[in-house]
């Protein structure tokens, strides 16, 4: 037997107290991991959505908060066509639509009215099942895979939105947030839904002949058309990442408090245990245990609680995150190794920290006073 | 030639008790030879246990010196005292202080847990179990043993490191008289077989009656020191 096995056997002496201390740390770690898993999922799905558009430029109304709140004039298309650096021009109208409340998932989705040009904007494996509609069709729709799943829709089914019923011709999948909240419809249907005049568009999405030309295209548009601006999805990725980082810090702060409460539980359990065993610790010292041996033994007990609690918390966190995803399908959960390691290390450091005071207290006991139970 | 194992020179020990100072020991000098089997007796509060703790490197005197096997314990820094406790001394107390979750064998090995490669002590432990007649009880938990048996386990624990001196503080206090007598006889046997010096602190006349030497302490001073011839 060595000090480590001795300490682990000590943990079994007050099973209820040890279990409660483990539970305290496990709940804290569960909170931290589940929130971070959700954060990781959110991050990859948001930055993924934006990266999907990478290489493309979006021409929108200057100062528009998002694409749905932008309006540009269709005459701009002609001007862009004369630019040799541009390969594809895709006029788009965004419609934020309320969907029937009978199904699961979001209450609002974004319909993007597109033309055939959109096929050249997205990647070749964009459509998972079915086909794109033709721009001259009306009442057709290509829907995101998660949205389809939530509403149990398949190719050929009808999806009523407002007064119009759309027939689904295809299902796209990008493995990003877009899958849960976006559906594509013909441009003219979108125009009708918004009751916009013929020359109005939300944005014009542009694919350069060569990605290096992006800056030149932006300079061209912004110098010639003062009312418009060019957005690079890369800029949006940066912006989103900043917001996500702030959110991540908040998640850490909130869950750190929970884990620290768990740590206080460990400190309390260890202090109680040291006090209860004071005469026994006196005996250990009287038989030649060094102060450091006694302290080490207490620290190992605290670490044991931390490691077991951390692992249980991690498992619970995975289950909680997965459950959250099942309840809220739009939520993407990603189990990343970084998060697993970070939360485990956090739990372990905290449990060691909580063990320090009880360990020092035990180590410093005078053998003779301890044996007398003072 | 007889070897001196313990020498105390003019030991005093004062405690603060609230505002007043208690003089637990008021100048105690004594010499104990290797292999002695002696009792320190005296009324409650006479300073017996205080003396035992000073001789056993558990506490430091207010003044005076304690030599254990030639080493002045008052000059050993606190962080080095563990070596003396580990290698030279064994303690048996009135309470057994056995750890309930460990088997009796594991309890006996508790003092050597921090020592590296401590599996070599297992044979010594088994030898001690047969010495105290508990070979069959090595894998029992303490609560499965009687008080006398538990005290015997505590004795094995005190002897695991082959100490030169075994200090026994009121060890019959929690046992009935028949069991107490058996334990003392056992220690006498160990004293003779292993040559370990045994120092009792006791109230119990039975214990002192079996000793070769009886030191009486009253009010922190030695009032008599008799060697008994059997």
Image (spheres, helix red, strand yellow):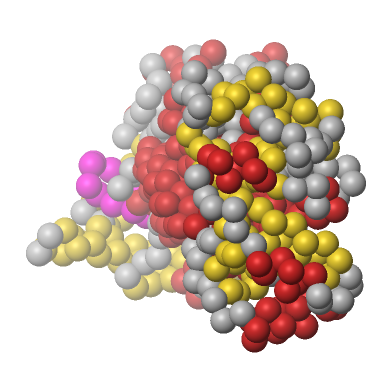
Q: Is residue B207 visible?
A: no
Closest to the observer, A66 or A87: A87
Compared to B73, does A195 lie above or below?
above
Residue A31 location in percent, x, y? 50, 41
Q: Is residue B48 magenta?
A: yes
Q: Is residue B118 magenta?
A: no
Closest to the observer, B169 or B98: B98
Residue at coordinates 37% horizontally, 40% vertically from top-left?
A272
Residue at coordinates 21% horizontally, 54% vertically from top-left?
B219
Closest to the observer, B20 or A20: A20
Residue at coordinates 49% horizontally, 63% vertically from top-left?
A65
Compared to B142, does A72 lie above or below?
below
Q: Residue furthest front?
A: A198
Residue B30 location in percent, x, y? 43, 60
Residue A114 location in percent, x, y? 71, 47
What is the total number of numbered labels drawn onto the structure image? 0
- Residues shaded magenta: B42-56
Compared to A59, does A178 lie above or below?
above
The N terminus of chain A sits in image quarter:
top right
Residue A172 location in percent, x, y? 77, 37
Q: Is residue A20 visible?
A: yes
User: In the figure, residue A121 lies in which quadrant?
Assistant: bottom right
């Amino acid at each position: 037997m060595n000090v480590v096995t001795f300490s682990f056997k000590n943990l079994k002496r007050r099973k209820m107290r040890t279990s409660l201390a483990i539970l305290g740390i496990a709940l804290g770690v569960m909170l931290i991991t589940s929130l971070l898993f959700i954060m990781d999922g959110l991050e990859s799905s948001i930055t993924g959505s934006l990266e999907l558009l990478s290489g493309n430029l979006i021409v929108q109304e200057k100062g528009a908060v998002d694409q749905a709140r932008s309006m540009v004039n269709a005459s701009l298309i002609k001007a862009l066509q004369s630019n040799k650096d541009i390969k594809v021009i895709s006029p788009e109208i965004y419609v934020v639509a309320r969907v029937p409340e009978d199904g699961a998932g979001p209450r609002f989705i974004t319909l993007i009215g597109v033309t055939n040009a959109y096929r050249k904007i997205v990647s070749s494996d964009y459509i998972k099942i079915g086909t794109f509609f033709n721009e001259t069709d009306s009442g057709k729709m290509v829907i995101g895979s998660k949205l389809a799943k939530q509403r149990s829709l398949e190719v050929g089914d009808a999806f009523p939105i407002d007064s119009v019923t759309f027939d689904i011709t295809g299902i796209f999948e990008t493995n990003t947030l877009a899958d849960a909240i976006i559906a594509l419809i013909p441009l003219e249907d979108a125009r009708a839904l918004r009751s916009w005049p013929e020359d109005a568009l939300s944005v014009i999405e542009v694919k350069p002949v060569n990605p290096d030309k992006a800056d030149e295209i932006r300079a061209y548009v912004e110098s010639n058309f003062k009312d418009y601006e060019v957005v690079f999805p890369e800029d949006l990725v940066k912006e989103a990442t900043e917001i996500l980082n702030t959110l991540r810090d908040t998640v850490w702060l909130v869950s750190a408090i929970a884990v620290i409460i768990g740590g206080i539980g460990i400190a309390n359990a260890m202090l109680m245990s040291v006090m209860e065993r004071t005469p026994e610790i006196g005996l250990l010292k009287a038989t030649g245990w060094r102060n450091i041996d006694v302290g080490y033994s207490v620290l190992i007990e605290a670490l044991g609680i931390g490691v077991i609690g951390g692992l249980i918390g991690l498992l619970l966190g995975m289950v909680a995150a997965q459950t959250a995803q099942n309840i809220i399908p739009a939520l993407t959960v990603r189990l990343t190794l970084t998060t697993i390691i970070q939360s485990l290390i956090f739990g372990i450091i905290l449990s060691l920290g909580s063990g320090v005071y009880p360990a020092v207290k035990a180590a410093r006991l005078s053998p003779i006073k301890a044996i007398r139970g003072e | 030639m007889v070897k001196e194992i313990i020498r105390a020179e003019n030991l005093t020990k004062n405690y603060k008790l609230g505002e007043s100072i208690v003089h637990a020991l008021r100048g105690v000098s004594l010499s104990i030879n290797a292999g002695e089997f002696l009792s320190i007796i005296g009324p409650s509060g006479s300073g017996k246990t205080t003396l035992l703790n000073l001789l056993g490197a558990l506490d430091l005197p207010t003044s005076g010196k304690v030599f254990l096997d030639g080493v002045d314990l008052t000059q050993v820094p606190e962080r080095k005292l563990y070596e003396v406790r580990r290698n030279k001394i064994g303690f048996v107390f009135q309470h057994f202080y056995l750890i309930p979750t460990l088997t009796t064998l594991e309890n006996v090995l508790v003092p050597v847990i921090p020592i590296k490669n401590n599996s070599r002590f297992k044979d010594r432990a088994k030898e001690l179990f047969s010495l105290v007649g508990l070979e069959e009880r090595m894998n029992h938990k303490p609560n499965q043993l009687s008080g006398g048996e538990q005290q015997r386990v505590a004795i094995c624990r005190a002897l695991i490191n082959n100490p030169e001196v075994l200090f026994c503080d009121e060890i019959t206090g929690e046992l009935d008289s028949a069991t107490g007598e058996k334990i003392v006889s056992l220690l006498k046997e160990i004293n003779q077989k292993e040559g370990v010096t045994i120092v009792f602190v006791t109230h119990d006349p039975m214990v002192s009656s079996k000793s070769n030497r009886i030191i009486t302490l009253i009010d922190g001073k030695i009032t008599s020191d008799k060697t008994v011839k059997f």
